[in-house]
Amino acid sequence: MKNNRKAEVWPTMVTPFKDDLSIDYEALEKLVDWYIERGVSGLFAVCQSSEMHQLSLRERVELSSAVMKFAAGRVPVISSGHISDSPEDQIEEIKAIADTGVDAVILVSNLLAEESESDLVWKERMETVLSSISNDIRLGLYECPYPYKRLISDDLLKWIVSTERFYYLKDTCCDIDVIKDRSKIAAGSNLKLYNANAATLLGSLQTGYSGYCGIMTNFHPELYVKLCDTWFEDTEKGKNLQNLIGLASVVEYQYYPVNAKYLLQLEGLGFSLKSRKQDYLGFTGSMKMEIEQMREVTKSCKS
């Protein structure tokens, strides 16, 4: 009988830069192929991992278009690039990214209201955005942690589901109880939920989440594909794999995204360590050894 319980893996793509900090499209093409060869379900082209807050709108549009070109229909592509403060600028960004032909434009939850402002303010501003863009634009939401993390409340999530405009939520709550509640709210709707937190991934799949969309796909996407493909078949193997990826995910807190670029450099993708977000010289020799050792440990679990 055909298995219908497989989940999806969506890398949050990093951006390769040349020495002059312009985008390295040759390395980007290799990166797209690297993800796809490892069985990912789709690509999140412009996001915080991509250093989107350090890219101009033109660069965000060009980056989205390039990933679409390099993916060549092999997997769907979604993109954010939604970073402005004013509603007018946000609407311009959404339309510009949508015009690249991506499969969905992902809105950032913390831009619709200040940290001190209520959910009512958030909803009113989202309604303004929705009324200003075409119904044909498929939308998603991303609980981006920068400049602050704004988690979507249960009441807002119910409203989001009711609009039937949203198809994707990149969930960064990192709380299995919240995950269980969200899964119940979204059940049977257009909205698919994707966990960004490695430690709670298996638990979220068991509640009905659609997969993983997070930082660690830049280190070993195969392990996430393996877990998402087989989590329901062998409980013990699933737990063991979850233990490994949960432990490995602590490198998120090390020196990201430079550490991911180092791993991709080791993979032969022609990456430099240059970043607009961090000084790559802060990536120490000890940090490099930690990435090398993690890579060796996880190699044995990929087959």
Image (tube, rainbow, N blue to C red):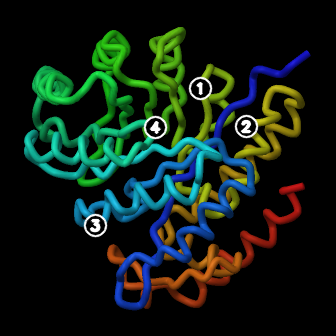
Residue type beneath disc 4: Asp
Q: Earlier in the sequence, mark 2 or mark 1?
A: 1
N-terminal-most mark, 3 or 2 = 3
* Cα–Cα gap, marks 4 and 2: 22 Å
Residue where numbered disc 2 is placed: 228
Q: Which amino acid does label 3 sit on?
A: Leu
Give the distance between the C-alpha atoms of the residues marked 4 and 3, in whole angstroms.
21 Å
Question: Tag 1: Cα neighbours inside 10 Å, few (<14), some, or many (≥20)?
Answer: many
Q: Where is residue 161 in the image (x, y as percent from the top left)?
A: 37, 14
Mark 4, other Cα within 10 Å: few <14 / some 14–19 / many ≥20: some
Observer-nearest residue: 200 or 265? 265
Q: State the SS at label 2.
A: helix
Q: Distance between the residues labelled 2 and 1?
A: 10 Å
Residue underneath mark 1: 209
Q: In this view, does 15 lie to the left or right of 297?
A: left
Position above or below: 179 against 104: above
Q: Is residue 142 above or below residue 256?
A: above
Could you classify mark 3 by the number of other residues whose Cα lies within 10 Å: few (under 14), some (14-19), or many (20 or more)?
A: some
Q: Residue 55 carries which label?
A: 3
